[in-house]
Image (cartoon, helix red, strand yellow):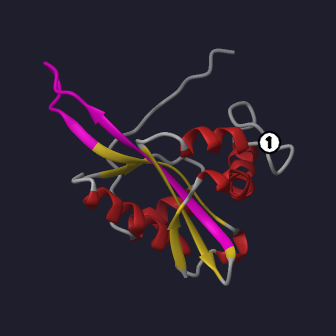
Amino acid sequence: MNIRKAVSSDSLLLSTLCMDVQKLHADAHSDVFKVPQSEDFARDFFEEILGNDTSFVFIAEENEEALGYIFCNLVERPENVILYARRHLMIEQISVRPLAQGRGVGAKLMDRVETAARELGVSMVQLGSWDFNTNAHGFFERLGYEKWHFQFWKRLD
């Protein structure tokens, strides 16, 4: 399996890879996440990301077939009166094709982000996961990620 850094010509490929995770989230929260209507639904989104110096996208491939991707941002927060300065990589999205799940693709993508963090001199990788996505929670915990912050919402309909 090869993990490579995405380039601008990968925007359509990333859009198609994003469909699986987008549908999963839209099924759980259709009032928050849009259902993809076509394979190019996120093409412009990825074109913008791939042009950003603080964004990193990696694609997992095997036998010239894309199996998944991971997208993260470098976050730098200055110190203030309340908090110390922080610099970390924030994983925004990870998606592995359903037929490729359970084969180590996600773990290799996560490992590549951790390598990128070390290369940037960053000592922390963070991510968020929706409450319904318990399979992802178990995956992250098996890789050594810890729960440390909870968000709550209340709908005022």
Instruction: Look at the image and tell me whether residue 145 can be seen.
Output: no
Instruction: Look at the image and tell me whether residue 19 can be seen.
Output: yes
Q: Is residue 78 magenta?
A: yes
Against 82, is 50 above or below? below
Residue 3 drawn at (x, y percent):
51, 72
Q: Is residue 22 left or right of residue 112?
A: right
Q: Residue furthest right?
A: 37
Assess disc 1: are there few (<14), some (14-19) or many (≥20) residues with their C-alpha within 10 Å of its C-alpha. Answer: some
Residue 126 drawn at (x, y percent):
36, 49
Against 132, is 144 above or below? below
Q: Amino acid at mark 1?
A: Val
Front residue of 12 and 24: 12
What residue sits 63% from the left and 74% below the top?
101
- Quadrant the N terminus occupies: bottom right
Residue bearing mark 1: 35
* Residue stretch rendered in magenta on the structure: 66-87
Front residue of 141 and 120: 120
Residue 90 drawn at (x, y percent):
40, 46
Give the main secondary structure of the magenta stretch. strand
What residue sits 76% from the left and 46% below the top?
27
Front residue of 104 and 30: 104
- Quadrant the C terminus occupies: top right
Give the SS element for disc 1: loop
Q: Is residue 48 magenta?
A: no
